[in-house]
Image (cartoon, grey):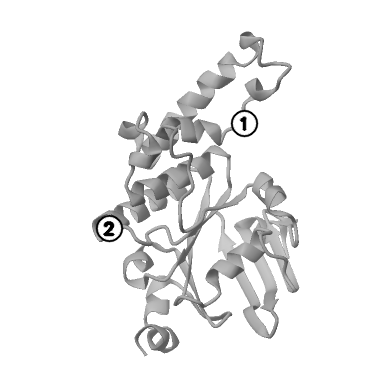
Amino acid sequence: MSTEMKDEFILETENLTKRFGGLVAVDHVTLKVKRNSMTMLMGPNGAGKSTFVNTCTGVLKPDEGKVIFNGMDITGWPPHKVYEAGFVRTFQIPMPFLKLTVLENVLAAMSHSGENPLKAPIKSLWIKEEEENVKRAFEILRKVGLEDMWDRESYKLGGGQLKMLEVSRALATGAKLIALDEPIGGVDPAYAGDILTYLSNLRKTWDVTFLLIEHRIDVALPFADYVYVMDRGKIISQGPPKDVENDPKVIEIYIG
């Protein structure tokens, strides 16, 4: 494979497999995510989507297969090392610091040399960096529609806004690939489209790729660049959204 082809994909899995006793939750999954794309991994509840992402990000150890991220073999890496490499995942239930403001939550996700006990007492060593971090945090909040809520304590946010705060915190770490577990799950349908629009715009204007794990095919599918569908641990369909939407195998698992 040429270097150009390798650079085209930020994430590749080869025959990734995860077993729990006799249950094969992820069954030899081969998947590729293009850089700066919005790729969706869809399927009914229990299909193995979250287990797949957990196995990619080191939460679970694979039994077989490989995970290649940004040209590096990260198979079996611990979660903190995957995170530091730029592959960040959020969870279905957002977990910000509820008593901190929106801005403080984003700043907390950024590295800051002022946290170094040797530098902390000398303000001149870190004040410029702090100013740059605040500027960058506001830029991120503008991109996700939370700029006007910067001084609001996060426990006062709605469910959809909390999910966007999680995205903001992931962006603040400098993530190259963000895996979002059901970003519109439990969100008011009127706001679900806004969330997906923000994400779609972000991947066009920011150096970031999104892997969305979803089961709400009706709302999410139009926003995808490419779609994989899982059922019972296997990839049963893949391709552009329209092709997947009309695939008889996909129609069967969703409609029966």
Counting from the top left corner in percent of width and height, residue 46 is at 50, 77
Q: Residue at x 42, y 85 (%)?
A: 253
- Whether residue 25 sits left or right of residue 172 in the image: it is right
From the image, which quarter does the C terminus lie in? bottom left
- Whether residue 147 sits left or right of residue 107 in the image: it is left
Q: Nearer the viewer, residue 105 or 242?
A: 105
Q: Which residue is mark 2?
A: 188
Q: Residue at x 65, y 13 (%)?
A: 125
Q: Residue at x 61, y 10 (%)?
A: 123
Where is 17 relative to 77, above or below?
below
The amino acid at mark 2 is: Asp
Q: Secondary structure at mark 2?
A: loop
Q: Which residue is mark 1?
A: 111
Which of pointers 1 and 2 lies earlier in the amino acid sequence? 1
- Circle 1: is it few (<14), some (14-19), or many (20+) Cα within 10 Å? some
Q: Nearer the viewer, residue 27 or 15?
A: 27
- Circle 2: is it few (<14), some (14-19), or many (20+) Cα within 10 Å? few
The amino acid at mark 1 is: Ser
Where is 19 relative to 120, above or below?
below
